[in-house]
Image (cartoon, grey):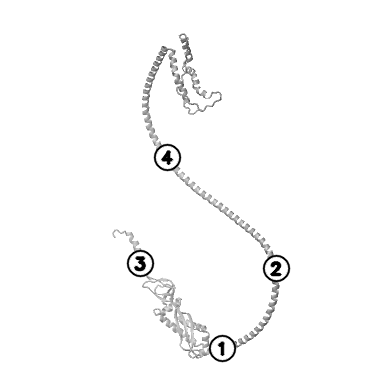
Amino acid sequence: MENFPDYLYIPILVVAVLLVLGLAFWARYKTVSPDEAMIVTGSFLGSKNVAIDESGRRIKIVRGGGAFILPIFQQAQFLSLLSHKLDVTTPEVYTEQGVPVMTDAVAIIKIGGSVEDVATAAEQFMGKPTESLKGEAQEVLEGHLRAILGTMTVEEVYRNRDKFAQEVQGVAARDLKKMGLQIVSFTIKDVRDKHGYLEALGKPRIAAVKRDADIAEAQAVRDSRIQKAQAEEEGQKAELLRDTNIAEATKEKELKVASFKKEQDQAKAEADQAYAIQEARSKQSVVEEQMKVELVRKEREIDLEAKEILRREKQYDAEVKKKADADRYAVEQAAEADKARRLREADALQYKIEAEAKASAEQKRLNGLAEAEAQRAKGTAEAEVIRLRGLAEAEAKEKLAEAFEKFGEAAVLDIIVKMLPELAGKVAEPISSIDKLTVVDTGHGEGAARVSNYVTSLMATAPEMLKSVSGIDINKLVQGLTRKALPDAADKPAAVPSPAAPTKPLPPAAE
């Protein structure tokens, strides 16, 4: 409790006070049901539904609601407003004619609904049992019933009970009003006597009723006999008239039957002919109706198909549009993502390029130094190689010149002749790579022979080709050697070396 906040004391106290007031209000608030009235007495009653008597005393009447009863200052009691049934019976009472009669009646009474009636009833019956209220009301009703009965004749009471009950109710209501009561209903159940006066009072009437009944019965029998005789006479006349009418009707019937028969036969013949015509027309109408129905059905099917096509087109458009929107959104998202990725990659690539450029620049600087050194070394080596190669070629040429000088033109010719087979092989090498060759003979025997003589013809141009390439004229060289050999061998013709055959065979001629 030492740590309990001080600012919570006031709200808790207010809640406690409100709770106590609520419980007090719940305990002191009284509700009233529709069949009762609450009588509140005491002080501070207010001015609504308050009854004040002649002496100035005040009571409050509450009906069909509720009220808060102040403790100590007010007190509440409940008064029932239910109705009560009373059986009112009188002993023998002498009527105006001096005839003693007895009467039985039923009355329904209750406390009045006004504030004055409830206040009056509360003043007189509050705290008393219900039997006391019923007893006092019954005595008042019996007294007024005897008083009214003494002012009327037996015939008036017997013949007009409603008037009798209304007079009793009107006189008794004033006295019951003073008690806070009201009559809901008052009914005379029975009026009787012990001396047979009421029975004798009814005998003349009964005798008159019986006499009138006998006379009426005799008159009825007489009238019945008269009416019976008249009826029999009229019946016989009616029978004769009936027989005559029947005969005439029979005759007219037979004539009409014959006429109807004739007309019927004619009508039947016409009907048979018309039936066939009508049957044909009916069939035609049926066929036309069937065609119309079929046409309507076809039109309906066409309409349904058109609507179905339209629905499918709309559905397709909707689906394609939705899919296109979804694809466009996906493409846009993918493009955004790719754009962001490319930006990141570009930044990374830029950083990488910058780093690589720096590294490459350094590497190139080092490589340039190394390459310059290598090029210098390579240039020195190549220069040495070129120098040595030149020396070797010069030495070779010198040796070749020495050989030419030593062996003369015959040695040169021998070397060239040895090179001709290799040259022929190089010339024939492209032809040997042909897989299939078709030769068409023109009829002069120049087909396959021209192909086989191709290499030979080509080799015939070899001296000219060698002359144009190396400047050596083989024909001139051979002629010079021949002229030198003629003085030594006059009997033998000079042999000119012929070109050697190609080293590789020709491909077979195609068919």
Residue at the image point whose x is 70% and y is 71% from the top: 258
Q: Which quadrant of the view contains residue 270?
A: bottom right
Location of mark 1 (residue): 210
The residue depicted at 65 percent of the width and 84 percent of the height is 232
Tell me where residue 268 appears, x and y as whole percent.
68, 65
Residue on which disc 3 sits = 20
Q: Residue 224 at what x, y percent from top left?
A: 62, 85
Q: Residues under labels 4 and 3: Cα distance?
A: 76 Å
State how far apart marks 2 and 1 are (Cα): 71 Å
User: Dots 2 and 1: beta carbons under 8 Å?
Assistant: no
Alpha-carbon span between mark 2 and mark 4 = 113 Å
* CA distance separating discs 2 and 3: 113 Å
Q: Give the residue pinned by disc 4.
A: 343
Amino acid carrying label 2: it is Glu
Say which quadrant the N terminus sits in: bottom left
Image vertical order of residue 3 relative to residue 436, above or below: below
The circle drawn on residue 263 is 2
